[in-house]
Image: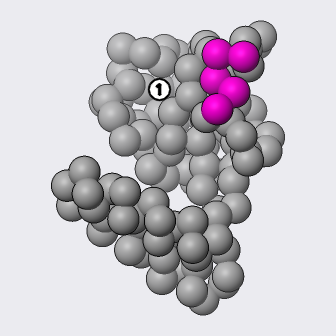
Amino acid sequence: MLIDTDLIFDEIQGYEFYHKCEVKAVIDDKVKGEDGELFEFYENIEYLIEEFDEIIVLRKKLTLMELEDFRDYIEKKGDIEIVKTIDRQIEEAKLTGIYITFACLHNDSFYDLHVFRY
């Protein structure tokens, strides 16, 4: 898979390669990979990602301060469900010192992942 990183340079800063897989199934905001990977997106991607497409998974380590800043930003936007998720991430970061978040690349598009299990 070739990706034009110039188009998504701002989004991928700070991320590192983590995993690559082929899509086996897509339902609403969930994708299942060839080796049992489970992806949950923040949006319905059923018509954006198809079976047999390739996905590249990226990961990023976030500090407690970065998470708190992001929480403030989301809270101002008024998305209470995402704020609850970020609060859980902040609690984990308080215990471990960092929180690892995942995103994926697909056909020159960048998507934040709500959940990634491998």
User: Image quarter for residue 42?
Assistant: top left
Using the image as rendered, state which of residue 25 and residue 69 is in the foreground.
69
Tell whether 5 sits left or right of 49. Answer: right
The amino acid type found where label 1 is placed reads Ala
Q: Which of 72 and 108 is in front in this view?
A: 72
x and y percentages locating residue 93 in the rendered image = 58, 79
- Residue drawn at x 70%, y 61% is 61
Residue sitting at the far bottom: 95
Instruction: Give the residue at mark 1.
Output: 25
The answer to whether 15 appears left or right of 8 in the picture is: right
Please report the residue visible at 58 percent of the width from the left and 76 percent of the height from the top: 64
Does the magenta run of residues contain 96?
no
User: Which element is circle 1 on?
Assistant: strand
For residue 26, what is the image quadrant? top left
Q: What stretch is highlighted in magenta?
A: 6-10
Q: Position of residue 86 (x, y in %)?
A: 41, 66
Determine if residue 111 is in view: yes
Residue 25 image position (x, y, % from top left): 47, 26
Image quadrant where residue 81 sits:
bottom left
